[in-house]
Amino acid sequence: MAKKLNLDGLPEDVPSMLPKKKTDLFRDLDITSDEGRNLQNVPEEPPTRVAQGKMGRQPAADPFLHSSSEPKTRIALGARKPVQPPKSALQQETAADVPSDPVVGWVVIIHGPGEGRGLQLGAGQNTLGRGAKARVRINFGDDEISRDTHAILTYDPKHNKFYIQPGVGVNLTYLGDEPVLTATPLSHGDKIVLGSTTLRFIAFCDESFTWAD
Amino acid sequence: MDVWADSGQIQGSRESQQDSYAHLEWKKGHDLLILTDGMGGAAGGELAGRIAAEEFRNTFLESQEENPRRRLLAALDGANNAIYAEKLHNSALSDMGTTLIGAVVVHDMFYWVSVGDSPLWLITNGQIIRLNADHSVGGLLDMRARAGEISWEEAKQSHQRHILLEAVQGADLEYIDAPAEPHPLQPGDTVILASDGIETCSLDELLEIVTTGRPSPSDIVEAVLEAVTSHNRPGQDNATLVVYRYS
């Protein structure tokens, strides 16, 4: 049973900012991804301003400084006495992590940033990209890889076949020496190049094994 | 301490020191960094922070989890459960809780778990970036300002910034910052775990300290604490930092 927030004593505007489900707040805003994280340098924060002129006016507080020197307060979480041990954070994450789709293959980085890493592929469409939304995230420092969908690697379980096709954006994908301009069949051992990163495609499902067996 | 990390703290104007920290080489090439900022009255705050830091470390070291992220989450559970246990047999401490940042460096990959509003900063390529979520009303306001929903002035001037939305206090945790992917580190990068007392200094000041000359982690600790102190801020909170340099 999700704990209700005790909003007593909080100013009016705070409750309106809080989402209906506490767990959604930070996840939705995905502030731990590149998109949400403040990757710009300090300029995004307002510069310090000092009020000038009239007597009796307080100088504007440095907006970066906390306005209060009070010790931390926090929202009471209902019953103060613990009634049962807390839920395991690890188990909650485990439940979320359990793959609902088994591995069908891998792409292994054989050249470029992240070299040596193998990334798992699942059935259906696998978006390859640098950002958090990519199903197969290649985020080891190669900025030439598009954030969202640089390419799509598809496994068709019905026919037991793999394909690669281009994604959105300006960056090209190469299969061996040739640019991928449309959906192209993929074979075990093929080399795929995104930006400065070379991947070797390893098929797990093949003539001798599929998950339908 | 080794050249690659150092830490330090000041008490500020507070009656006690309620921040705790640790940094150790867990195994070769793997460094573990921990910081907690306790709260809940004179006795409770110090205890919560200390219990959490110690249990986090012990659980992490003893865990069978191979995956660094899962290991960090297991350690967080350990810390949370320890506070729960303490509260069970001491009802006077029912209010106590703590923020927590636990981070581990595995080769060039930086993993972390964070609850609360203690900042985790990365200084790289001449920039200072906050890596972790800010589980406070201030963090919420900043996100809204970043999204253009409110002005930065409104966000920064709010008197509610300090209100915490989550803490390690022996209860279910609904906000946990534990990103699915680690952050890759470049040689020369500096990571700082800090309690919010350090935020008496601006990001500009911190960036200046880290990027001027070639300060060692020890140099940085000393310079930052000095900078915090020199602000002579009334009611200065405990201020603690752990500085880690990846090379």
Image: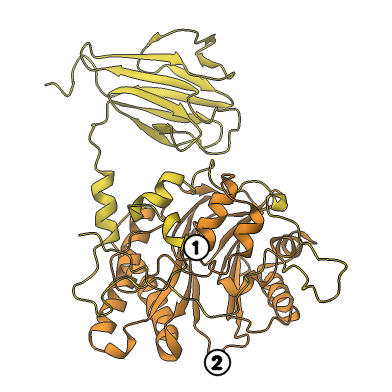
Chain colours: A yellow, B orange
Q: Which residue is mark 1?
A: B137
For label 2, count other residues whose C-alpha is less than 10 Å away and answer few (under 14), some (14-19) or many (20+).
few
Q: Nearer the viewer, residue B126 or B116?
A: B116
Q: Position of residue B184 (x, y in %)?
A: 54, 47
Chain under label 2?
A: B
The answer for how far apart the CA atoms under marks 1 and 2 are is 25 Å
Going 30% across and 70% down the picture, which residue do you hit? B78
Q: Position of residue B108 (x, y in %)?
A: 53, 50
Residue B1 visible, this orientation: no
Quarter occupied by the C terminus of chain A: top left
B148 sits to left or right of A53: left
Q: Secondary structure at mark 1?
A: helix
Q: Quick one: which residue is furthest to the right in this view? A: A53
Going 45% across and 70% down the picture, which residue do you hit? B99
Quarter of the image where one finds residue A207: top left
Q: Quick one: which residue is furthest to the left in this view? A: A213
Given the image, on which type of amino acid does mark 2 rest?
Answer: Glu
Question: In this rendering, is residue A189 above or below A74?
Answer: above
B66 sits to left or right of B112: left
Q: Position of residue A120 (x, y in %)?
A: 34, 32
Q: Nearer the viewer, residue A101 or B201?
A: B201
Of the numbered discs 1 and 2, the one sitting upstream in the chain is 2
Q: Which residue is mark 2?
A: B15
Chain under label 1?
A: B
Quarter of the image where one finds residue B228: bottom right
Question: In this rendering, is residue A8 above or below A167?
Answer: below
B14 sits to left or right of B211: left
